[in-house]
Amino acid sequence: MKILLKLVLLFSCFSCANQSTADKLVQTTESPDEQHWASGKREGVGTYFIDQIPAERVMKVTDSGNTTFKAFEINFNVATHPNEKKEDLAAGEYYNYQMQYDWTALSRNDSLKPVFFQSYPTLKQGEFKSVIIFEMAADKNIDTLIYQDQKAIWGIQKIIVSK
């Protein structure tokens, strides 16, 4: 009887150990850095991810030959404050409406501001997704994206787009 009890305990501990190892593997293989074009993290604030997407995915683009559009999908995951709804509402207002004014694209010697910005809802609290589009001359490319938020929470983020 004691041997049977020890075997049952041994197998249950082994399955628990395997379960926690499997959970750890699932968590580590879902690394967002591998899935996105650019990313950043600031301790105590959150993370952001940027992906370059075709502008046609968001708007109808007609070929004028003179101009082109570059689109970027931006995802911010920010720390939430469960007891401070006012701060969360202010953060939501910023990321959904005001964040567009804090982006600048550098193209050779020009600085460009977005011509289109659209946020869209997510189900996850503290997650804010949006698309931002820049218009430029057809013969130019964006060299660098610069993000400098109004409240200086994120600092200045410089994302090198092309060399």
Image (cartoon, grey):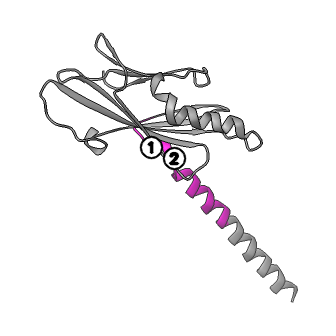
Image quadrant assignment for residue 144: top left
Q: Measured from the top left, where is residue 150 in percent x and y?
A: 56, 20
Binning the other alpha carbons within 10 Å of mark 2 as few (below 14), some (14 to 19) or many (20 upward) gives: few
Q: Is residue 70 above or below residue 11?
A: above
Please give the label number shown on residue 154. none
Binning the other alpha carbons within 10 Å of mark 1 as few (below 14), some (14 to 19) or many (20 upward) gives: few
Badge 1 marks a residue whose secondary structure is helix
The residue tagged 2 is: 31
Going by the picture, which residue comes out furthest to the left?
A: 65
Amino acid of disc 2 = Ser
Going by the picture, which residue comes out furthest to the bottom?
A: 1
The magenta stretch is 18-38
- Marks 1 and 2: CB-CB under 8 Å? yes
For residue 116: magenta? no
Badge 2 marks a residue whose secondary structure is loop
Amino acid of disc 1 = Glu
Q: Measured from the top left, where is residue 20 in percent x and y?
A: 67, 62
What residue do we see at 50% from left, 48% from top?
A: 121
* Residue 38 shown left or right of residue 86 in the figure: left
The residue tagged 1 is: 34
Task: Tell me the distance, in whole angstroms, between the alpha carbons under discs 1 and 2.
Answer: 6 Å
Q: Is residue 12 above or below residue 92?
A: below
Q: Nearer the viewer, residue 150 or 139?
A: 150
Q: Measured from the top left, where is residue 33 in percent x and y?
A: 48, 41
Going by the picture, which residue comes out furthest to the top?
A: 109
